[in-house]
Image (tube, rainbow, N blue to C red):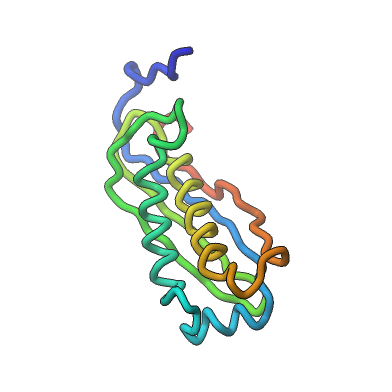
Amino acid sequence: MPTADVSRKFETLRIARAYGRIYLSPQCIERIKNNQLEKGDCISATKIAGIIGAKKTAELLPFCHPIPIDYIDIKVSITEEFVEVVSTVKGVARTGFEMEALAAVMTALLNIYDMCKAYEKESMVMTDVKLISKKGGLS
């Protein structure tokens, strides 16, 4: 089964943004806010995990082309009910960065789950993961 042929496309600046959230107990939200998780600083680790997730996307998805990423930003916001993650991924390539932006969000959310699983398990819910914008190319 072949990959998509992007050889005829032009290299252009492309930007993708993705979003997701994880619902947690109020106690776990407070632990994150106060940097009281046994595994360490959840916010910093989540940002790093998101960056790694974007960079490793082509290794995880068999039909995703490895493309040069020029910029990754992971924003993490905490509310009383959930932690939300927004990723921005951009670069100059023949294909877009939507899979990298989505992988960044999912990896960041998985990191939060991993760091909080000692305190709660079944009540954590990752949801609303979606592409929120895509620019560049023909779209």
The quadrant holding residue 15 is top left
Q: Which of 71 and 135 is in front in this view?
A: 71
Is 7 situated above or below 90?
above
Is 110 situated above or below 121?
above
Q: Which of 112 and 18 is in front in this view?
A: 112
Q: Nearer the viewer, residue 18 or 112?
A: 112
Q: Position of residue 97 (x, y in %)?
A: 41, 40
Name the residue at the right extreme. Answer: 123
Name the residue at the front extreme. Answer: 118
The quadrant holding residue 60 is top left
Is 21 situated above or below 130?
below
Q: In this view, does 21 lie to the left or right of 8?
A: right
Q: Where is residue 1 in the image (x, y as percent from the top left)?
A: 48, 12
Name the residue at the bottom extreme. Answer: 34
Is 77 situated above or below 107?
below
The quadrant holding residue 6 is top left
Q: Which of 1 and 119 is in front in this view?
A: 119
Q: Position of residue 2 (x, y in %)?
A: 44, 14
Q: Identify which residue is drawn at 37% across, 40% down.
A: 14
Q: Identify which residue is drawn at 45% across, 26% down.
A: 63
Q: Identify which residue is drawn at 56% across, 75% down.
A: 78
Q: Identify which residue is drawn at 46% across, 72% down.
A: 42
Q: Where is residue 108 in the image (x, y as percent from the top left)?
A: 48, 58
Name the residue at the top extreme. Answer: 1
Q: How many labels does the image show?
A: 0
